[in-house]
Amino acid sequence: MEQIQFHRLFESVNDFIVEEKDRLITAFADYEHVISFLGDGHEHFEQNLLFTIHCSHAGEVTMLPLAPTAAEHAASFYIRRFAESNSLDCQIPESHADILIRPLPEDLQEGEDLLQEFGVPDCRVCLIHPGSGGRYKCWHLDNFLAVAQHFRTKQIEPAFLLGPAELERFSADDMHKLRHTGPVISNISLDQVLKILSCADFFLGNDSGIAHLAGAMGKKTIALFGPTDPANYSPIGPESTAIVCPSENFQTASINAQQQVMDTINRLLTPKQPQNH
């Protein structure tokens, strides 16, 4: 998003300028219909977006509110509002129990190669992503480290996935703790993240895009929520579990919070007993 400079769409209509072969024009050139909630409440965004699209072709734009205001999942909210805005008869899913993203065979192979490259043993793996787009949504690192050790007692190897924000935020001491606890995977693209996730058995992380990706792939996903509401933003998927930790100490080391997550892990690892009929 930063490379394409979408932030320019927030400029005043009088100041907004696009030139021939502008990256904004080429970014939208292949789309007949653009749906956006980025410009919610901004008077110039929609006009600038329409102008940009019409520089290359005739297209439509639907603007959606940024976030649901009630206890409705964001996915259902956006589907409903899009249907209403375009007078569509659309069935809103009552549950989100389907696997939405399935890796290709070559994704699995490349994922195995990447795990080997980063020194992850050939065994059951939990991919742990201790970051998020907002620092306020990040569980304390010491909590992740403690839970990672718990995974190892269950013969599951923890591996840490770090994005650019975490590499910038974590201190040298933090990185030492991470590497001492498990392999660290960093400086990879989003499609490589998908390939690694395709080979993982578990995912643990904050309320983040990677957690949603893991959930949609049908991975056993534990997403940690503090200041955000899982009723709106929990990952979609048949094996997704949202854990709410008190927001007042979400960013502090907490033995009680660690135990809450460990208990959930134990429950998810316990084989389900067949029901008697």
Image: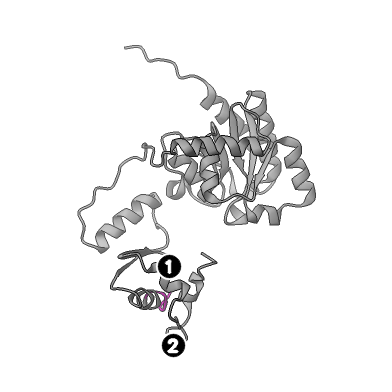
Disc with the residue nearer the chain's start (1 vs 2): 2
Q: Residue at x 69, y 44 (%)?
A: 141
Rate crowding at label 1 as few (under 14), some (14 to 19) or many (20 or more) other CA atoms within 10 Å: some
Q: Amino acid at mark 2?
A: Asn
Residue 40: quadrant of the picture: bottom left
**Disc on res. 27:** 1
Toward the viewer: 208 or 94? Answer: 208
The three-letter code of the residue at mark 1 reads Ala
Give the residue at mark 2.
Answer: 14
Q: Which residues are magenta?
A: 41-46
Dominant secondary structure (helix, strand or loop) of the stretch shown in magenta: loop
Residue 45 part of the magenta segment: yes
Where is residue 83 shown, x and y percent of the image? 26, 57
- Taking the image as shown, residue 90 lies to the left or right of residue 277, namely left
* Label 2 SS: loop
Looking at the picture, does residue 125 appear above or below residue 93?
above
For the C terminus, the quadrant is: top left
- Residue 222 in view, yes or no: no
Q: CA distance from mark 1 to mark 2?
A: 22 Å
Residue drawn at x 43%, y 74% as measured from the top left: 42
Q: Is residue 91 above or below residue 239?
A: below
Residue 59's label in the rendered image is: none
Determine the residue positioned at 59% across, 45% down.
Answer: 246
Q: Is residue 273 magenta?
A: no
